[in-house]
Amino acid sequence: MKKLLNKNESLKSELSKLFGEQEENIENAAHFLKVMSHPARLRILCALREGEQTVQNLEYYTGIRQTTLSQHLSLLKTRGVLASRRESTYSLYRFSNEKIAGLFDLIKEVFCP
């Protein structure tokens, strides 16, 4: 029993060292994944995987009403998942970087084979 306790303490110590150095990264990843975990936001990300889209196109593709859609887009943009630009009277949204798009592709591959 004592040997098992020492082994557990040793493992706990090793994990504390590892997580202690990565605590901020772990927290950031958890917040990021939480943002992506809403069904409406996953629909938005799926539509954006086809390329940059206007709010009007996203409303059409996702079936989400514009007021709700705008709230989700704002949150995704604030948290760094999406980027946007203005063109004339339109706002166009896209993934903020290809690594995030790749993460979404992996999620899609696992859950939508």
Image (cartoon, grey):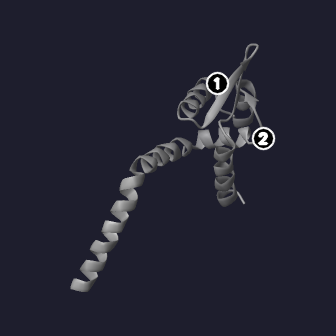
- Mark 2 surroundings within 10 Å by alpha-carbon count, few (fewer than 14), some (14 through 19), many (20 or more): few
Tell me residue 91's x, y (percent). Answer: 70, 21
Seen at 49% across and 45% down, the residue is 34
| Residue 1 appears in the figure | no
Seen at 68% across and 50% down, the residue is 102
Q: CA distance from mark 2 to mark 1?
A: 20 Å
Most extreme residue toward the top is: 88
The quadrant of the rendering that contains the N terminus is bottom left
Asked whether 59 or 99 is in front, the reply is 99
Is residue 5 found left or right of 91 in the rendered image?
left
Question: Mark 2 highlights which residue?
Answer: 50
Q: Nearer the viewer, mark 2 or mark 1?
A: 2
Mark 1 residue type: Gln
Seen at 64% across and 27% down, the residue is 65
Mark 1 lies on a secondary structure that is: helix
Q: Quadrant of residue 48?
A: top right
| Residue 19 appears in the figure | yes
Asked whether 52 or 66 is in front, the reply is 52
- Mark 1 surroundings within 10 Å by alpha-carbon count, few (fewer than 14), some (14 through 19), many (20 or more): some
Q: Are marks 2 and 1 in contact (CB under 8 Å)?
A: no
91 relative to 73, above or below: above
Mark nearer the N terminus (2 vs 1): 2
Tell me residue 103's x, y (percent). Answer: 64, 50
Is residue 10 found left or right of 65 in the rendered image?
left
Asked whether 100 or 35 is in front, the reply is 100
Asked whether 3 or 39 is in front, the reply is 3
Mark 2 residue type: Glu
69 relative to 46, above or below: above
Mark drawn on residue 66: 1
Mark 2 lies on a secondary structure that is: loop
